[in-house]
Image (cartoon, helix red, strand yellow):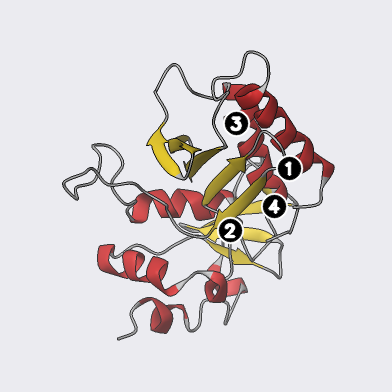
Amino acid sequence: MRDLRADPFVIEGLERLSREAFGPAGFARGTEEVVQVLVHRGSSTLGHGCARTGGKLRDLVDGKEEFSYEALIVWLDEYRSRAYEPGIGTWTSAEVHVYPDRPGVVELFDEELLKKTDDGRWHPGAEPAGASIWARQLLAYPRTADCIPDWMWAIFTAEGVDPPLYNPEFGAVDWNNRRRPVERWGTDPGARPAVIDPALEPGFFQGLGRRLFRA
């Protein structure tokens, strides 16, 4: 994916978050750091955050200690699209660190950074994603077969799902016998999908079965 750490879009977004946390009316005044984790699942987002003071971490209070929707969610949604590289993909989870006295940073991960309860269970509604969710993710930000990580292939294999795949020959994503054009920031959601005629494309899907159902 694209490295945007020095991009003004990212720098200005982090500065806005710092103002919301540590400015005159900030919800984290008196703390040393705010950490916010966002996990993207296409049409939904999971998140959890904490604040650090004197080396100790505490969870942020929902509804009281939080960033605005526009500053965090909307910004990261666009960040994710901007970071997409056709055929390679984009990130799944973002860990945002902001400070009162120095520039913030964003750490990006190609996996879900989910948080468990104190007794080791997943929070209701925040269990690890299944094949259908990952398929929607790959439809929006498609990858070639080689750029889909092994752990994601294992999920598709276990559930018997063929994932969407980026087709570099056409600059498109192919799935369920349909082809959709892929632009710089992901699949074009407004484009009408075309029906694929396998007889006209010998060899493209060769090897997919071996990869999907390998031992």
23 to 9, vertically: above or below: above
Residue 78, position as x, y percentages in the image: 67, 38
| Number of on-image labels | 4
Q: Which mark is residue 103?
A: 1
Task: Give the amino acid type for the residue marked by disc 3 in the picture.
Answer: Leu
For marks 3 and 2 on the same chain, the one whose residue lies earlier in the sequence: 3
Q: CA distance from mark 3 to mark 4?
A: 16 Å
Q: Which residue is mark 4?
A: 83
Task: Give the amino acid type for the residue marked by disc 2 in the picture.
Answer: Pro
Q: Are marks 2 and 1 in contact (CB under 8 Å)?
A: no
Q: CA distance from mark 4 to mark 2?
A: 13 Å
Task: Give the amino acid type for the residue marked by disc 4 in the picture.
Answer: Ala
| Residue lying at the far front of the rendered structure | 54
Q: Secondary structure at mark 1?
A: loop
Q: Residue at x 54, y 20 (%)?
A: 27
Q: CA distance from mark 1 to mark 4?
A: 20 Å
Q: Which residue is mark 3?
A: 72
Q: Nearer the viewer, mark 3 or mark 4?
A: 3
Residue 58, position as x, y percentages in the image: 39, 35
Crowd around label 1: few <14 · some 14–19 · many ≥20 (10 Å): few
For marks 1 and 4 on the same chain, the one whose residue lies earlier in the sequence: 4
Q: CA distance from mark 3 to mark 2?
A: 24 Å
Query: Which quarter shows the C terminus?
Result: bottom left
Q: Are marks 1 and 4 in contact (CB under 8 Å)?
A: no
Crowd around label 3: few <14 · some 14–19 · many ≥20 (10 Å): some
- Picture quarter containing residue 91? bottom right
Q: Which residue is mark 2?
A: 142
